[in-house]
Amino acid sequence: MKKKRSVTLDMDRILLSEKRRSRRLRIPLKIEYATLSKTRSICETICSDISGGGIGIISRHPLKKGEKVRTLLYSPEDKRPVEAMSVVTRCRKTEDHAGQEIYDIGLKHVTISKSDQRRFLALLMETFVGYFLLDKKKK
């Protein structure tokens, strides 16, 4: 008697075959971040993209790959920011439209509370559904 083989989709393997695990959305939200170095400088900027695992930001200040930062993400619908500890995954020097030196920085969330994680994912879902519905209405 032959054994029946079940076929299952391993979503993690499928997603890992691509560069990113989560789709990125371009949502210009206010971000504050602070390095954990002795100087603890606090910077404010706008995120360039957002996904389930982290955020992309544009900054005038470079960060080192692997450096840990505390991030606060502000949503227009929520008075409390989403707080996360993040690690720098990339920092590329580029220029803005005026030719000024800026940095394209990728931040991966490494520590986030359960309540902030729920609020962060709710923000992603609301935005994704909103864009999807708006896109459908245009067609």
Image (cartoon, grey):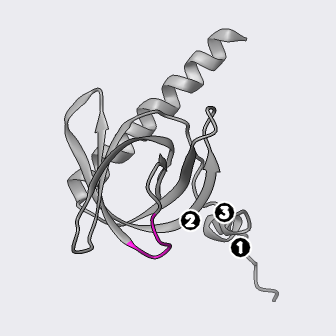
Label 3 crowding class (10 Å Cα cut-off): few <14, some 14-19, many 20+?
Answer: few
State the count of labels.
3
Q: Is residue 65 magenta?
A: yes
State the residue at coordinates (72%, 63%).
18
Q: Amino acid at mark 3?
A: Leu
Residue to which mark 3 is pinned: 15
Q: Nearer the viewer, mark 1 or mark 2?
A: 2
Quadrant the N terminus occupies: bottom right
State the residue at coordinates (26%, 59%).
41
Q: Earlier in the sequence, mark 1 or mark 2?
A: 1
Quadrant the C terminus occupies: top right
State the residue at coordinates (24%, 59%).
114
Residue to which mark 2 is pinned: 90
Q: Amino acid at mark 2?
A: Arg
Residue to which mark 1 is pinned: 6
CA gap between label 1 and label 2 equals 40 Å
Residue 130 appears at what percent x and percent y?
49, 23
Verify CB contact (< 8 Å) between mark 2 and mark 3.
Answer: no
Q: Nearer the viewer, residue 92 or 70?
A: 92
**Prevailing SS of the magenta stretch:** loop
Residue 12 appears at what percent x and percent y?
61, 68
CA gap between label 2 and label 3 equals 20 Å
At mark 3, the secondary structure is helix
At mark 2, the secondary structure is strand
Verify CB contact (< 8 Å) between mark 1 and mark 2.
Answer: no
Residue 75 higher or lower than 24, as above or below: above
Q: Nearer the viewer, residue 50 or 87?
A: 87
